[in-house]
Image (tube, rainbow, N blue to C red):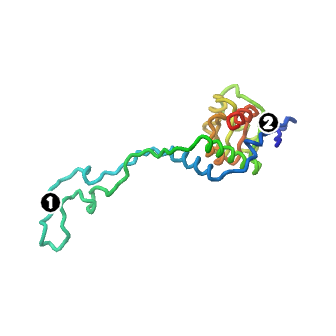
Amino acid sequence: MELSIYNIQGKETGKKVTLSKEVFAIEPNDHSIYLDVKQYLANQRQGTHKAKEKNEVSGTTKKLKKQKGTGGARAGSMKSPLFVGGGRVFGPRPRDYFFKVNKKTKTLARKSALSYKLKEDNIAVLEDFNFDLPKTKTYLELLTNLSLVGKKTLVVTAELNENVYLSGRNVPKTSVKPASDISTYDILHADRVVFTVGAIEKIEGILS
């Protein structure tokens, strides 16, 4: 499939780029997408949650009342989970949420996500560009020219472009990433994915 190439002024250059069917036009595999996104979100969790259990709570070990004759249930410690300030039963402990997803599955997931975006006509291609200086105003002008202001946008460059990255870092609902770093979650989370010509070549090389 061919897509028109735009410049940073939002005008068509008259050139077209041919997208690889092996990357942008496969039959999407929903289960691979589910696994890859699940792993991505799991890896965002710090896993530092912790609640004190009965043996970790500080407090007196003195028996509260005599064992029998009070008419109530027996109680041996204020640290019991039954009392305010007591420990928690089977509380959360620090853990790592990582689980393995095969490389081929992750590759299939990214191809599937890109295929969905192309079917929805939510992929645009820009000619390779750079900013002389990191400037948010220049980046906002780019989004305005492409009618993307206020939309969740993923801008994909061939390599890490520091000036472009720093220009868009503080703009809400948009992110700038090199082709080697984009994940299935990044692709699906964006309303619109904007590739540079160099990024198209790079991502096809990575996923083919």
Q: Residue at x 34, y 56 (%)?
A: 90
Q: Which SS class for mark 1?
A: loop
**Position in image of residue 198 (x %, y %):** 74, 31
In the depicted view, which residue is nearer to us: 145 or 22?
22
User: In the figure, is residue 90 to the left or right of 25?
Assistant: left
Q: Residues within 10 Å of mark 2 (few under 14, many from 20)?
A: few
Q: Which SS class for mark 2?
A: loop
Q: Residue lying furthest right in this view?
A: 14
Q: Residues within 10 Å of mark 1 (few under 14, many from 20)?
A: few
Amino acid type shown at disc 2: Gln
Instruction: Say which residue label 1 marks.
Output: 63
Tags 1 and 2 touching, CB below 8 Å: no
Residue 9's mark? Answer: 2
**Position in image of residue 181 (x %, y %):** 62, 36
Q: Residue lying furthest top in this view?
A: 132
In the depicted view, which residue is nearer to us: 140 or 20?
20
Q: Residue at x 72, y 28 (%)?
A: 130
User: In the figure, is residue 164 to the left or right of 81?
Assistant: right
The mark that comes first in sequence, 1 or 2, is 2
Instruction: Name the mark nearer the viewer: 1 or 2.
Output: 1
In the displayed structure, 94 sits above or below 77; it is above
* Residue 47 falls in image quadrant: top left
Observer able to see residue 151? no
Residue 27's mark? Answer: none
**Position in image of residue 136 (x %, y %):** 66, 34
